Image (tube, rainbow, N blue to C red):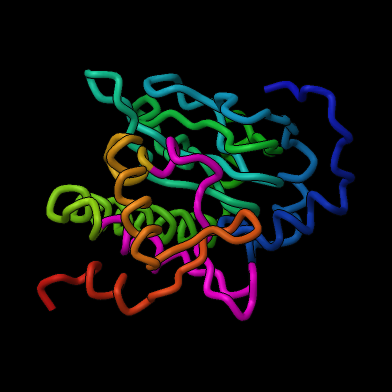
Amino acid sequence: MHSKGAVMLDFSLRQNLLARSDLFRGLPDTLIRYVATHAVERTLNDRDVLYLQSEALDFIALVAEGQVYSVIHGPDGREQIVGSAGVGQVVGESALIEGHARETSAFACGPTRVLLLGRRHFPMLFAEPLFWQRVVMLLMARLLKVIELLELVCLHRLESRLARFLLANIDDFQLAPVTCAAVPRNQGILAAMLNTSRPKLNVQLQHWRRSGVISCQSGHLVINDVEHLRRKACPLS
């Protein structure tokens, strides 16, 4: 839980980040100041591990910069990414529930900075009723995403899974007026999110590139035929 030596966030920036975060937004100022005071800052490089599956639940983490992916590991070594957190989102919130170990591992995607709050500071959070409401809402949202992911990887072919992912991650501001999709920086991460191998994913992407459905422009994945992806995303509709 020690910082690796980057320029530290000042106290006001910490408070502003916490006040806008999905877990602490709307909570009393005294509680936000308490967390800002006691949180430990840590910087991570690309693929650095924040915590490992089955480790003790020692802290929760708030993403200040970059992105953190949550992953589970299969017996054959395959990784399945089951969640991601960007700026202002919390990782490892299951540490708030006692009695079990980490259910996933978490690693950084690109240069990342997080604020860690250790278990010894949890009682202050637990004393605030609104905090518990926020925790329940976040856990329910995570559960719904896991159910959606389970349906996706178990019941749909790769082209349908990929089409749904691209449509769900359309970012019209990346290269406006062109329609772009926000995708991970490498195919390995995307393959782990879609429960497939990198070669199979590459075959599907290349097929869509050759047929003109997607293309690459200025380093962005451009969707040229949104309707085609919609048909592939819902083949039975």
In the image, residue 229 above or below residue 2: below
At which x and y percent is residue 205?
A: 36, 52
What segment is highlighted magenta in the picture? 161-190
Which image quadrant is residue 138 in? bottom left
In the image, residue 200 above or below residue 53: below
In the image, residue 212 above or below residue 203: below
In the image, residue 176 above or below residue 84: below
Does the magenta-highlighted stretch encompass residue 50?
no
Which image quadrant is residue 148 in? bottom left
| Residue drawn at (39%, 24%) of the image | 53
- Asked whether 105 or 156 is in front, the reply is 156
As drawn, is 47 to the left or to the right of 103? Answer: right
| Residue drawn at (37%, 53%) of the image | 142
| Quadrant housing the C terminus | bottom left
As drawn, is 176 to the left or to the right of 30? Answer: left
- Asked whether 40 or 183 is in front, the reply is 183
As drawn, is 212 to the left or to the right of 185? Answer: left
| Quadrant housing the N terminus | top right
At which x and y percent is residue 82?
A: 36, 43
As drawn, is 180 to the left or to the right of 39? Answer: left
